[in-house]
Image (tube, helix red, strand yellow):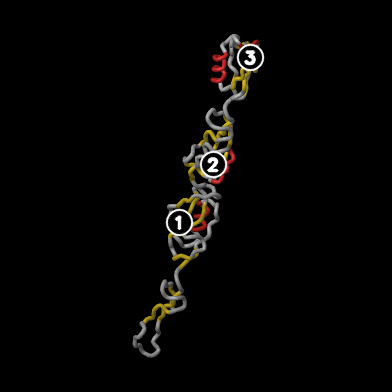
Amino acid sequence: MQFKFSDTVEKGMVISSDPGGGSRVPHSRRISVVVSKGKDVVTIPTVAVGSTPDNAKALLGTVPIEFNPVTTSKPSDTVKAGLVLGTDPPGGTSVKRDSEVTLIVSSGPPILSVPDVTGEDDKTATKDLKAAGFKVKSTEDYSSVVDTGKVITQDPPGNSQLAKFQTVTITVSKGHAPVVIPPIPSLTPVDDATATLEAAGLQVKVNYVYGGLLKKVLGMSPAAGTTVPYGSTVVIDVA
C-alpha cells in the first residue's frame, strides 16, 4: 500500500490500484493500492505586524511555500513605513505546497487632500483640518482685508497633498494693524487735516474753539505719533 497526496481524492480513499479495477487476476495475486493522503497543503505562518521584512521572510521560510520577491506596500495609520503589515494570502491560510506568498509592507500614513480653510473662523478651520486627519498649528497676523478671527492663509495651501497626521499651519487675522497718528501742523485747514486722518484709517471729531471761524487746526488728541487701534477717533481743535 502506498500513500500519495491528491487534490481530488479525499484522505483515506483509494486513488488507484494495480491491476486496475475490473481486471481479472489469478487467485492470491497481490494487488497494490495507492491511498490518498489528502491535499498537499501547508499553512502560511502568521507574521507579526510591525516586524521587519527580514524577520517575516525568515518565518515564511520555515514552510514549503514560494516567497514572492516583489513585496507590495499599503498605507497604514499605525505601522511605520517599511515594516510588515501581513501577507497575501494572510497567515493561517492553507495553500498548496510551493504556493506563492506576497509580503505586505507599510508605506506609512496615507496621502490626503488638504481642505481649503481660508476665510473660516479659527475654531471651524481647526476642526475641519483635524477631521481630515491633520495636526494644526495656529499663528496670528494683521490683515486689512480679512476680518478678525478668520484664516488669512494656510500652509500647505488648500487642495494640496499631504501625509496624514502632518501639520497644517493656519494664520489667523488680528484685524487691521494699529495706526500711528500722522502729524497735522498747526493752522492746517480743517478739511485737509480731516482728509489726512481719514486716509490713515481714523475717525475725526472736530472741536470748534473761539467760534471756529478760521477753520484752522490748533491741536489734536491723541497727539501725532501715538499708536492707536485702526478706526480710532481723533479729536481736532479747530479755531
Question: Would you identify the image quadrant in which residue 127 lies?
Answer: top right
Q: Residue at x 49, y 37 (%)?
A: 157
Q: Nearer the viewer, residue 78 or 129?
A: 129
Mark 1 vs mark 2: which is more N-terminal? 1
- Callout 2: 10 Å neighbours few (<14), some, many (20+)? few
Q: Nearer the viewer, residue 91 or 168?
A: 168
Q: Residue at x 55, y 54 (%)?
A: 49
- In which quadrant will I find the N terminus? bottom left
Q: Is residue 128 left or right of residue 70?
A: right
Q: Residue at x 43, y 62 (%)?
A: 99
Residue under label 2, please give it.
Answer: 166
Question: Would you identify the image quadrant in which residue 40 lies?
Answer: bottom left
Whether residue 205 is visible here, answered yes or no, is yes
Q: Tell me the SS state at disc 3.
A: strand
Residue under label 3, please give it.
Answer: 208
Mark closer to the observer (2, 3): 3
Q: Is residue 238 left or right of residue 16?
A: right
Q: Tell me the SS state at disc 2.
A: loop
Q: Nearer the viewer, residue 57 or 220?
A: 220
Mark 2 vs mark 3: which is more N-terminal? 2
